[in-house]
Every structure is written in C-alpha cells, then in structure tokens.
Amino acid sequence: MRLFIAFCFTLMPGIAATWTGSLVDAKCYQTIEQNHSPTDTETYVDRDKDMEIRFCRPKAKTRAFAVVDFNGQSFTLDSAGNTQAAELVQNAAKGTKRFWVTVTGEMSKNTVKVDSLVASK
C-alpha cells in the first residue's frame, strides 16, 4: 500500500502554489544580496530589506524579475513570468514606488514557472 501511494505521488504533476511579495529587478537584487563582507557573520541583522527592495524596484527597461516575500526570501520568475511582470510595470502609474504582486505557479529550485501574476495591495 505504501509503495502504491509513493508511486501515485511521483506521477502527480506539480502542485501550484501562491506567493505574495514585492516585485524587484532580479539582477539588482541579486547584486545587493551578494554585496557583503566575507568576514561578516551577522548576515541579516544589519540589513535593511525594505531599502534594498526600494532600491531595486523595476523600471521600464527591466527584463529579469524576482519576487521578495514578506519573510525576505526571494525567487526568480521564468520567461513567461518576466513577460507578465514587464507588462505590469509598463502599465503601472508613473511614479509607482513599489509593486506588490501575487504569483501563482510551480516552484522549481529557486524559479517559479508562472501561471499568473497580478498586482495586489
């Protein structure tokens, strides 16, 4: 019986999940996350995540996007998600300082295969 249940789970397609967070420029955010002293042992204690998110807010020319959730964890979007995010940024009101989004899709490693990406508040 256990073998049958395990077999069923391996055949089951990935289950979609939903994440909410801030949309950021993936390259900018990755650079900031890697920019710390190699001898620094207090990795997140003295970091201002909100400032990092505001600094890396996406612009009209941004092509690679990431989402930073409320816990400070980030993940990148696949090409379909990047296209949807670019459209969202292009259509946003001028002067928008922060893009809150809800992403639905399947996580693979640190990238989400996006089914939908919508602006949220």
Image: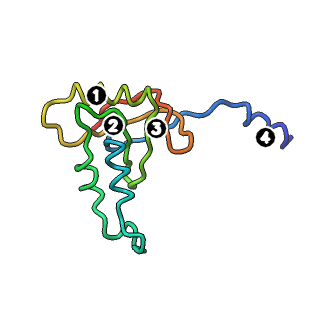
x, y percent for residue 17? 51, 37
Q: CA distance from mark 1 to mark 2?
A: 9 Å
User: Who comes first in sequence, dot 2 or dot 4?
Assistant: 4
Q: Which mark is residue 101?
A: 2
User: Who comes first in sequence, dot 4 or dot 1?
Assistant: 4
**SS for dot 2:** strand
**SS for dot 3:** strand
x, y percent for residue 104? 45, 33
Nearest the viewer among 7 and 25 is 25
**Marks 2 & 4, CB-CB < 8 Å contact:** no
Q: CA distance from mark 4 to mark 1?
A: 40 Å
The crowd level at tag 4 (other Cα within 10 Å; few <14, some 14-19, many 20+) is few
Q: Which mark is residue 6?
A: 4
In the rendered image of this protein, does residue 89 appear above or below residue 69?
A: above
User: Who comes first in sequence, dot 3 or dot 2?
Assistant: 3
Q: Which mark is residue 21?
A: none
In the rendered image of this protein, does residue 35 appear above or below residue 86?
A: below
**SS for dot 1:** helix
Q: Which residue is mark 3?
A: 18
Q: Residue at x 30, y 57 (%)?
A: 49
Q: Is residue 15 left or right of residue 41?
A: right
In the rendered image of this protein, does residue 26 appear above or below residue 80?
A: below
User: Who comes first in sequence, dot 1 or dot 2?
Assistant: 1
In the image, what residue type sits under mark 2? Val
Q: Looking at the image, is mark 4 or mark 1 nearer the viewer?
A: 1
In the image, what residue type sits under mark 3? Thr
Q: Residue at x 83, y 37 (%)?
A: 4
The crowd level at tag 2 (other Cα within 10 Å; few <14, some 14-19, many 20+) is many
In the image, what residue type sits under mark 1? Leu
**Marks 1 & 3, CB-CB < 8 Å contact:** no
Residue 52, image quadrant: bottom left
